[in-house]
């Protein structure tokens, strides 16, 4: 009986042996937490403005994108394989973003709603990919730029529209 339990224990250890040392554990942890936090920052801004995709959605998109690129990278995938993984992430987020876009058919045929939310989710996935690949500085800079676009650009547009009406 103890031999059976020993085999089970050895098998379980082998199954959870994808993180082999402290350095790798730290790297994985930092990248995944960074992706989730940066996605959360963008999600908080969107939720604060009452948009449909908020903190949890953005965090999950960034975390998922980071995980999709982190695992193959840890497995030693070549650049061409990583390129296909990133293409898959982009395509998948495209479907998610398409679900947030609504066309208003109540008399105003040209009114589309949710396009900025879809673009924000797309950007959040890109930030997650950058964090997952270990490009944390690029991910942080991209998050700051996206946050500025979400926050500052509406103010600039309002000011410009106000001056056009005057």
Image (tube, rainbow, N blue to C red):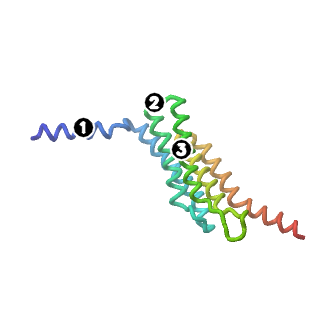
Q: Earlier in the sequence, mark 1 or mark 3?
A: 1
Q: Secondary structure at mark 3?
A: helix
Q: Earlier in the sequence, mark 2 or mark 3?
A: 2
Q: Is residue 83 above or below residue 147?
A: above
Q: Earlier in the sequence, mark 1 or mark 2?
A: 1
Percent position (x, y) of residue 75?
Answer: 43, 33
Verify CB contact (< 8 Å) between mark 1 and mark 2.
Answer: no
- Neighbours of disc 3 within 10 Å: few (<14), some (14-19), many (20+): many
Near-viewer residue (97 or 9): 97
Residue appearing at x 48%, y 47% in the figure: 32
**Residue 8 located left or right of residue 109:** left
The residue pinned by badge 1 equals 11
Residue appearing at x 54%, y 30% in the figure: 80
Near-viewer residue (9 or 102): 102
Q: Is residue 58 above or below residue 29?
A: below
- Neighbours of disc 2 within 10 Å: few (<14), some (14-19), many (20+): few
**Which mark's residue is nearer the viewer, 2 or 3?**
3
Residue 148, quarter of picture: bottom right
Q: CA distance from mark 1 to mark 2?
A: 23 Å
Q: Is residue 8 above or below residue 121?
A: above
The residue pinned by badge 2 equals 76
Q: CA distance from mark 2 to mark 3?
A: 19 Å
Residue appearing at x 53%, y 47% in the figure: 92
Percent position (x, y) of residue 69?
Answer: 50, 40
Q: CA distance from mark 1 to mark 3?
A: 32 Å
The residue pinned by badge 3 equals 89
**Which mark's residue is nearer the viewer, 1 or 3?**
3
Q: Secondary structure at mark 1?
A: helix
Residue appearing at x 33%, y 37% in the figure: 17
């Amino acid at each position: 009986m103890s031999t059976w339990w020993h085999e089970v224990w050895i098998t379980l250890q082998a199954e959870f042996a994808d993180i082999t040392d402290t350095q790798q554990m730290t790297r994985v942890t930092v990248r995944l937490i960074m992706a989730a936090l940066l996605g959360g920052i963008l999600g908080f801004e969107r939720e604060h403005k009452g948009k449909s995709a908020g903190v949890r959605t953005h965090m999950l998109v960034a975390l998922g994108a980071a995980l999709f690129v982190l695992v193959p990278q840890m497995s030693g995938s070549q650049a061409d394989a990583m390129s296909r993984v990133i293409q898959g992430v982009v395509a998948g987020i495209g479907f998610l973003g398409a679900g947030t876009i609504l066309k208003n058919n109540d008399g105003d045929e040209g009114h589309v709603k949710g396009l900025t939310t879809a673009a924000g989710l797309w950007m959040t996935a890109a930030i997650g990919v950058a964090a997952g690949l270990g490009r944390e500085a690029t991910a942080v800079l991209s998050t700051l730029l996206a946050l500025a676009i979400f926050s500052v650009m509406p103010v600039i547009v309002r000011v410009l529209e106000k001056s056009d009406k005057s």
